[in-house]
Image (cartoon, helix red, strand yellow):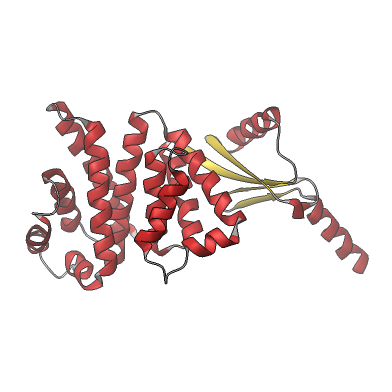
Amino acid sequence: MRAASRESLADLRSHLVETVSSRASQGADVTEIWPALAGELRDVARLLAAEPGLRRSLADPTRQPDARARLLDTLFKQRVSAIGLAILDAAVRERWSSAGDLLDTIELLAIDAELEFAAGSDSLAEVEDELFRFNQIVLAHPDLLGTLGDSTVDVAQRAGLIETLLRAKAQPVTTRLVIMALYGLGGRSFPSGLARLVELVAQRRESQVAYVRTVVALTPEQETQLTDHLNRVYGQKISLKVRLDPSLVGGAIVEIGDDRYDGSVARLLEQARTKLAA
C-alpha cells in the first residue's frame, strides 16, 4: 500500500477497536460482536472482490466522501448490522491509493476482528500454531493442495472440506481464517494466504515469525536457545516455526523477513564443490 492507504488503514484499525469498545461500555457482549462483525466484513470483502466496478465506485477519489457513503448505505444498510455499517462508512470516507487497497483493508479488518476475539479468549498463540501446522500439512500433501486449489470446484464446497478437516481439531477462529485464505486473501495463493495469516497473528502478539528448516526436529532446549538468541538480535519477541527438510542433509536455515541465515550442510557442500571446480 502507498502512504495514503497505509494511513487510512491505521485510522480504521483504531476506529474498529474504539467502536467495539464503546459498544462494550454500553453493555454489549464483545464475544458476540467480534465474530459477527468479522463475518460481515468478510462477506463485504468477497462481494467487492467479485464486483470490481463497485469497489472502484466506493474508493473513487473524484467522488465526494458523502456520495460514497450514500452509495454504501443504499447497498448495505439492510445487509449488515449498525456497527458493521459504521465501520464500512468510515472506510469509504477515507482516501485510498487504489480500489484494491480498500478491498485489502476490509479483509484486514475482518482478520483483526477475528484476532480480537481470539485475544479475548487467550487463544492467539494456539491460532498461530494451528495456521502454521495446517499450512505445512497442505504443502506436504500435493493431492490435498490440488483439491483445495482447484478453481473448477465451487469454493463453498472446498470450504466445506476445510471445515470437515478441522472440525474438533482447531479453534473456530482458525477454521474461519483458513477459509478466508481459500477465497484468495489479497489475491494470494492458498498457501501464501495461510503464511500471511501466520504473520498477521504474530504481529497481533507483537512478535515476528522466524521460519526454521532443519533435518531433525529441534529439542525444546534448542528451540528455547534459538528463540532467546533471535530475541536479543532483533530486539523483539520471536515466534519460531520449525519444519523438517531432509534436502538440507544437516544443519539448518533460518529466515526472518528478508534475512536468511543458511547453516545447512547442503550449502557447505555446494561451496566446497564450487571451490574444487575453481
Residue shown at the point (85%, 57%) measured from the top left: 269
In-front residue for pair 4/47: 47
Whole-percent x, y for residue 205 in the image: 43, 35
Question: Residue 72 occupies which quadrant of the picture?
Answer: bottom left
Q: Nearer the viewer, residue 260 or 48?
A: 48
Residue 15, x across and y down, in percent:
21, 42
Q: State the quadrant of the N terminus.
A: bottom left
Residue 116: percent from left, percent from top: 32, 36
Q: Is residue 224 visible?
A: yes
The quadrant holding residue 181 is: bottom left
Residue at x-position 18% and y-position 67%: 61
On screen, residue 62 above or below 138: below
Q: Position of residue 232 (x, y in %)?
A: 60, 32
Q: Is residue 278 visible?
A: no
User: Who is closer to the viewer here, 135 or 233?
Assistant: 135
Quadrant housing the C terminus: bottom right
- Which residue is at 39% across, 48% downward? 177
Please indicate whether residue 33 sits to the left or right of residue 204 in the image.
Answer: left
| 152 left or right of 99 in image | right
